[in-house]
Amino acid sequence: MTPAAVNKYQRRRAVAGPWALSGNHGRSFDGVVVVPALAEEQSLPETLNSLGANPARWREKFLVVVVVNNRCDAPQPWREQNGRTLTLLEEAGGSGFGLNLAWVDASSAGLELPGGEGVGLARKIGFDLALECLDWRGDPLCASLDADTLTDGNYFEALMAHFRNCTSAGAVVPFRHCRGATPELDDAITHYELYLRHYVLGLELARSPYAYHTIGSALACRAEAYVAAGGMNRRKAGEDFYFLQQLAKIGGIEQVGGTMVYPAARLSARTPFGTGPALARLQDGELEAVRFSTRESFQLLGAFLRAVERAVEEDVDEITARLAPLSPALADFLGECGLDGFWSKLYRQHRRPDARRRAFHQWFDALRTRRMISRICDHHGWWGTAETVIPSLLTHLGLPSSGNADNYLKVLRKYQKSEAGV
């Protein structure tokens, strides 16, 4: 990417505010890892130590940026923790924890995040400020981690190797949640991780291009793709979902092989939805906090995607008649989305099947896919529990499907890890 393109992004899309990098940011790096931290006084040192356990020849290629953040309405204990975290980073200095370490104060008076903002803006601040520190003569990388997530000792090396050997815009890193501190919390994180894995498995069976995990502590991309995607979005939660969706549209998502990250299993009120709030509800016995889509819903999604594939290949300029027999709920959903109008436009603007296919998946993206699954599950009653849904998916793949939730999770972890060549 040319310096002019980066400068254009910085003028038009980069975050504006009073924030600045402190610490070690005086030379060009091959990559940056951004770590937002909100009241993470206890967990952040462990995360940085895990990064510091990587070999020096790989550590020196990366800048690690910690964005210590809170809003002005944050609880006082959180603000006090952030103050102590900033002191810790200042005392560690730019080479603390064996890393090229930089940090951003988005916590102190006058530097807080604006009201209504959250982790999305914190990540964006870190990435946008770090663009100046990257070596744009090569193909620099951007990686996202959380302050409660540990890494393997080859994390940096695996990221470099992955992007050196593929052409995708973005990547997801295999993950495995840490054990819960209590039996109840451990059961909750098992249930939640099963939910995450079953959904991606279903999308894979349907051959959706959006079959990847969306976890903020387990994603990376080329810095060029970061800029082309318009940078990280500013959502208070779900920023990882929307950012990866944009990367998928630009140049696809692939899974990194040979390494893993380990998010913590803990209750949290830092975001309005996501792992922390879901765990709190699951621990209290609210299993409806996450809903499992049955195999039939993913089979219908697959049938829909295959019908579209045939239509773009066969120059079918009308699609509704092909889809109507599949499911009334699907037909209603697509009608509300404006498929007919989009399809006519698709044929006017694109003559080649490959161009139509790309344009269709730009339109029927990860968000529309998720909404479609929800709609047809509501209509057909295709919701189930982990115990009723997971065995059916595993059996369909020819994988072991007996036992309990712990057994299902072991099988899925092994399968989805091996799919990435770990």
Image (cartoon, rainbow, N blue to C red):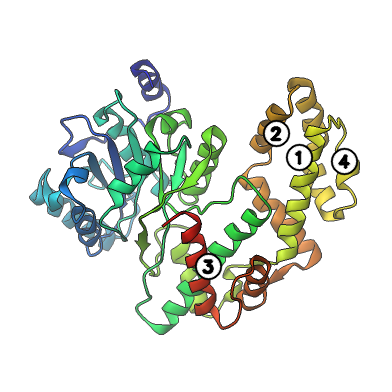
Looking at the image, is mark 4 or mark 2 earlier in the sequence? 4
The x, y position of residue 131, in whole percent, is 30, 30
The x, y position of residue 210, in whole percent, is 59, 47
- Please give the residue where the numbered disc 3 appears in the rendered image: 412
Image vertical order of residue 144 relative to residue 339, above or below: below
| Element at label 1 | helix
Q: Is residue 353 left or right of residue 258?
A: right
Residue contact between numbered discs 2 and 1, judged by CB atoms under 8 Å: yes
Residue kind at label 4, given as amino acid type:
Thr
| Element at label 2 | helix
The x, y position of residue 261, in whole percent, is 36, 58
- Of circles 4 and 1, which is in front? 1
Between 214 and 396, the one lying in front of the other is 396
- Please give the residue where the numbered disc 2 appears in the rendered image: 357
Between 148 and 285, the one lying in front of the other is 148
- Please give the residue where the numbered disc 4 appears in the rendered image: 320
Residue contact between numbered discs 3 and 4, judged by CB atoms under 8 Å: no
Tell me, yes or no, if residue 306 can be seen here: yes
Residue contact between numbered discs 4 and 2, judged by CB atoms under 8 Å: no
Looking at the image, is mark 2 or mark 1 earlier in the sequence? 1
Residue 309's label in the rendered image is 1
Image vertical order of residue 58 relative to residue 201, above or below: above
